Amino acid sequence: MASKIYEWLDTRLKLDAVGRRLLDEPIPGGASWIYVFGSATLFLFLLQAITGMFLTLYYAPTPDHAYDSVQFIENEIAFGSFVRGLHQWGASGMVVAIGLHMLQVFLYGAYKPPRELLWMVGVVLFLITLGFAFTGYLLPWDQNAYWATQIGINMVGTVPVIGDLAMRVLRGGETLGALTLSRFFAVHVLFLPATIAVLILLHLFILRCVGPAGPWRGGVERRRSGEPGASGPAERRLRTSEPFYPRQVYMDAVVMLAVFASLSLLALTVSFPLADKADPSDTSFVPVPEWYFLLELV
Amino acid sequence: MNHPKQQDPVTEGLCEPSGSRRTFFKRATGAAVALIGMGLAVPLIGYLVSPAFKRRRQAWVEVGDVAGLTVGEPKQLDYLQVVRDGWLTTKLHKAIWAVKQADGQVTVFSPLCTHLGCSYRWDDPDKRFMCPCHGSVYDAAGKVLGGPAPRRLDVLPSKVENGKLFVIYKEFKAGLTKSVEL
């Protein structure tokens, strides 16, 4: 049955050709475990998207109900704390994966011509990811969320000239309140996802245009094989290359499974209890930002 | 997908894997994807459907001490029920009529007149319930004494435990000769 449907589709859409096109990207120097971080990041993004969609089933983005709705997910919905745990650990995991991905690209010189655009789009993707982290942190509306966001927005306020305006725009007014929560929610679940989806496609499109950079020592050989502008087809002529499928796909899949297993384990064993409900009048609370924002404080 | 085996001797070791190695990579990839898929699908489906299996339990609500009631003298008691609607908690506030019988049992009446749902009151000098809207009259046992009321006062489920009176609040359709729960 399934093969008949596939056949029917294939005769019309030429799926075999499309599949080969997608999977036969040559990898100079062959598949390697060092190339898995991009796929791991993509996997984590998809995991965030899926768990995020499910979290919105029960979440209510208003100061009156946000905290209670997250408590409801945590305590009364089957697998609620697991789904929320996956989303929270996945956020940290994604920052780690991006860090490793950028480190690999940097060490291997894979940002050099003709791949500068790939790097630039990648940097924007990283900043959008931090935007996700910042906007998502407010949503549970507990003391930590409220005060950490208060501080983050105040930091924006210290920017010369436009700081004050930027702060008002972020808050949606004078104070951190209902308008802030609903705009952070909208940005977190609609604006940023739409933007990041387009940029991820652009990132992958550019990757296919310029081709993967290959191993450390490939440099001389690559340069000999043609000018940078002609490097795509030139690299395809590289004799020491291997198609993306099946070995690199296998490595990527194994790493994705390992990432998923680790996140599941963390989500099951380390819970994220909420602090008390956000209280704007409490002056004694000391908030802690997520670890990946700690550098900003230095 | 079938790929022709590359012949170039230079690419040996780097060339596309074939035969049983290729099968292994394919199967391992499929297994990893299947494991992730299952690991996600089971909790997510459970998460999605779990509220559908929760029934709202109508719980007994304590309305006061039986000792505070006098035999044959109806008393209006506060009925305060906390209703959970997902993450929302609302309070249902009603007043109910409790009458202690000679045998110690307590009868609890719905506070709405069976004619059109007005709130009635106890007329102590005349020892009867009076509805101010259209003049229905009931005795302390809920029996109709006069007016347009089509049936006796509706009785709410109640029980006495350790001297405390417990009630479940319900509403009934007005204007019918039979008591029909809404």
Image (cartoon, coloured by chain):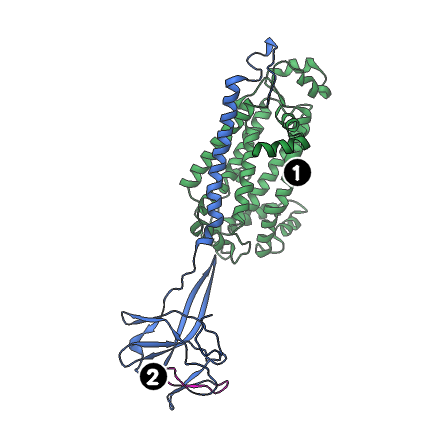
Question: Among all residues in the image, which is located at the extreme top?
Answer: B9
- Name above or below for residue A77 compared with residue B82: above
Chain coloured blue in this rendering: B
How far is mark 2 from mark 1, CA to CA? 75 Å
Q: Amino acid at mark 2?
A: Glu
Same subunit under labels 2 and 1? Answer: no
Q: Which residues are magenta?
A: B132-144
- Name above or below for residue B33 compared with residue A165: above
From the image, give the main secondary structure of the stretch colored magenta: loop
Protein chain holding label 1: A
Chain coloured green in this rendering: A
Q: Nearer the viewer, residue B30 or A182?
A: B30
The residue where tag 1 is placed is A198
Res B155 → quadrant: bottom left
The residue where tag 2 is placed is B73
Q: Nearer the viewer, residue B17 or A84?
A: B17
Q: Residue at x 63, y 33 (%)?
A: A123
